[in-house]
Amino acid sequence: MNFVSPAIGYWFLFGFAIVITLFTYFFARRSGWQTKEGFLLANRKVGWVLGGFSIASSWIWAPALFVSVQVAYQKGLAGIFWFTLPNILALLIFAVFAPKIRARFPEGYTFTQFIRYRLQSDRVHKIFLFPYIFYQLMAVVVQLFAGGSLLSLLTGIPLTTIMPILALIVLIYTSISGFQASIVTDFVQLGLIYVVGLIILPLAWHAAGGASAVSAGFHGVQNIQSMLDPGVAFSFGIVTSIGLIAGSISDQSNWQRAFAIQDGQVVRAFIFGSVLFGLVPIGLSTLGFLGANPALGITLPEGVDPSMIGVQTVASLLPFWAVSLFVVMLLAGLSSALDAGLSAASSLWVTDVVHPKDDAAAVKSARRSMVAMTVIGLLVSLAAVYVPNFGLQQLWWVFNTIAACVMVPTVLSLYWDRLDERGVFWGVLVAFFVGIPLFVYSNLIDNPVWIVGSTLFVVGVTLAFCLAFPKKVVRA
């Protein structure tokens, strides 16, 4: 079911591209992005307010915009509780980690650069690079897949046409000034999310019948009675919590902001960002509750991914102009996460892979890496379209579990001086080649016990190897 014509959809994308690109170009003219430090870290001069906006906006991935509504729709209060709480905690922990790495590695650019310095090991550095780069690739894939699905649903434009357009829009404005572009547009994009949300959500509640209509969907379509339902906590809560926290720790965009925010302001920035973020999935979850209210009769078109229930709810309750505003809000969130992924990937490439000789070469190499990441991400997104029974939630779980492979050694590297490269290398290797296949198989057979067990195995095996091979203490 299309809500606007394809022609209007194309004009809508064109207008969004022009506005956001001109805005980026205007602010790029006055910043010193021409150097490596400027392009990758905005010269380490980001204040805590702007930094908080950027932290929240870059963490508002497609899961925050779509999966949050989906789990509220399917699992009710229990679903949104186990989605939102670990999401907030995943940002709050950086209020502890960020000042720690700044104290130990003040001139750093990436966490993988730090791990190489910390353990003096090329093989550990290489094995860490894989999940960190893969995570940014999946950031691109998820945003393109979700954003394309959204606009395809609304406009009737083929998904395989929309995804390349979205990729090109974000690549153009992000490549202008790198991390500076991401920071500036994050502020605008989060502002749009809040302004549009404050308009659309109350209108949807009123159109549905008020607070009683929202509360009628609190149990979700699966009729889960308790917010602390043990079945949801086990099958969804554990996997989601580990995945989100691991994803946050393995997300170079968070470490990039930890290095870029002004010294002494990083704690305030991450606390502020976690609060700004948390309000978004909580507010959007009410659309899932309305969708689950049987009295409203809201249903998804056949074959549409259930993560689109929020869009369907707005379209069922409100007029065309409201749907258009809602799409603006969703596109703002998707593009902010997408540009953060490209910027973070460029910092990993320049710092950990190619090591350019001067500032001009660094900026040039960073832009090339953005192009390469966009192309690869687009190809993976197009491939995902043709995988049966594969939606946004499955994609999200897989890459978060890969991130979990390096979660334990990442934390230990900051706080345990006896961490040795042997334990890290073999622990992560076993997690990759045993834990990840187990997790994928568990999802294919849809066995909750196996899913949780394989997730805990990934975390447990890396911890076991790190503890089994501690660094020897040299005694005088």
Image (cartoon, rainbow, N blue to C red):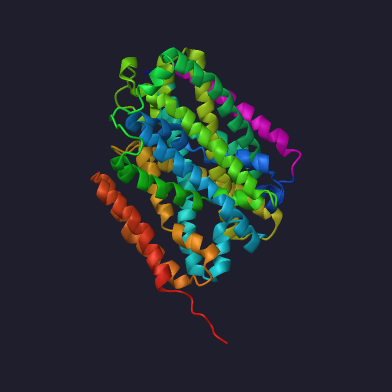
Percent position (x, y) of residue 73?
A: 36, 28
Please name the residue shown 55% across and 30% down the image: 332
Please name the residue shown 52% across and 29% down the image: 331
Task: Give the magenta-colored segment's residue range.
Answer: 2-31
Q: Could you tell me if residue 269 is visible in this image?
A: yes
Residue 467's place in the image compared with 101, above or below, is: below
Please name the residue shown 58% across and 62% down the image: 114
Q: Could you tell me if residue 339 is visible in this image?
A: no
Percent position (x, y) of residue 11?
A: 54, 20
- Determine whether, in the image, residue 157 is placed left or right of residue 260: left
- Determine whether, in the image, residue 18 is placed left or right of residue 384: right
Residue 14 belongs to the span the image colors magenta: yes
Percent position (x, y) of residue 465?
A: 39, 68
**Toward the viewer: 366 or 420?**
420
**Toward the viewer: 469 or 443?**
469
Task: Tell me the quarter of the image containing the N terminus.
Answer: top left
Task: Tell me the quarter of the image containing the C terminus.
Answer: bottom right
Residue 439 belongs to the span the image colors magenta: no
Percent position (x, y) of residue 234?
A: 31, 46
Residue 271's place in the image compared with 315, above or below, is: below
Corner quadrant of residue 358: bottom right
User: Can you name the residue that lies furthest to the bottom here?
Assistant: 476
